[in-house]
Image (spheres, helix red, strand yellow):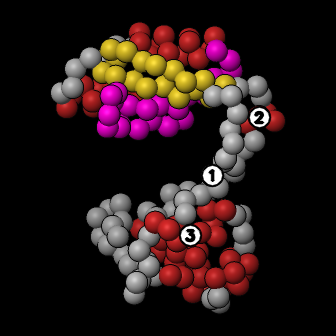
Amino acid sequence: MKRSSGSAIRLDRLDLKILSALQTSGRISNLELAKKVGLSATPCTQRVKRMETAGYIRGYGAVLDIDRLCRNLVVFTEITLRNHRREDFLKFERGIQDIPQVLNCFLVTGGYDYLAQFIARDIHDYQTVVEGLLDRDLGVEKYFSYVTIKQVKRSTGYPLAALVAQPGA
């Protein structure tokens, strides 16, 4: 596995247990974390610091309940670019970074180029955001919107045990 600066570190099963625990409970104390993964406090702290430095842990934050905070609308949008040169993709990808209502955006295969997840106050706010996106001339040829009705599953983290090859497996 590679670190963001280019040097590699090897993660073992204890590192993966630490990462799994932290992604579901970022405020867990080091003592509780160490107990949970079967380490003493000092080696646990050292492992966490090593993984932070290596870029495996990008940060810590609170998971907000946006529905309790405000009314909102989540929209998934298929976006197709007019042209398909490398610079067209780069221009779009740079421009989309500046739109705070875009929660996630993925380059995809298939019948369109990007799948973006927007959040807005309501449908009118979403349309204003999209019109602003089009006004920025990022090369969008067409878009199709899918308004969500309700979220039926919310992730609390990545299923590391299913995704990462276990050492010795």
Q: Is 101 on the left or on the right of 10, as rendered?
A: right
Given this view, does label 1 or label 2 mark the residue nearer the observer?
1
Q: CA distance from mark 1 to mark 3?
A: 15 Å
Q: Residue at x 50, y 37 (%)?
A: 104
Residue 100 x, y percent position in the rendering? 54, 29
Question: To which residue does mark 3 refer?
Answer: 19
Depth order, front residue of 150/130: 150
Among numbered discs 1 and 2, the one appearing first in the sequence: 2
Q: Inspect the image, locate mark 1, and give the three-letter code of the amino acid beneath it.
A: Ser
Question: To which residue does mark 1 refer?
Answer: 155
Q: Quadrant of the N terminus?
A: bottom left
Q: Inspect the image, locate mark 3, and give the three-letter code of the amino acid beneath it.
A: Leu
Depth order, front residue of 59/16: 16
Q: Quadrant of the C terminus?
A: bottom left
Does 117 lie within the magenta span? yes
Q: Inspect the image, locate mark 2, and give the three-letter code of the amino acid beneath it.
A: Asp
> In the picture shown, does residue 128 fall above or below 145?
above
Mark 3: secondary structure: helix
> In the picture shown, does residue 91 fall above or below 58?
above
Q: Are marks 1 and 3 in contact (CB under 8 Å)?
A: no
Q: Residue at x 39, y 24 (%)?
A: 79
Does 78 lie within the magenta span? no
Residue 137 x, y percent position in the rendering? 34, 13
Q: Quadrant of residue 92?
A: top left
Mark 1: secondary structure: loop
Q: Residue at x 73, y 78 (%)?
A: 32
Given this view, does label 1 or label 3 mark the residue nearer the observer?
1
Q: Residue at x 70, y 33 (%)?
A: 150
> In the picture shown, does residue 79 fall above or below 161?
above
Residue 70 x, y percent position in the rendering? 77, 28
Question: To which residue does mark 2 refer?
Answer: 67
Magenta residues, start to end? 99-123
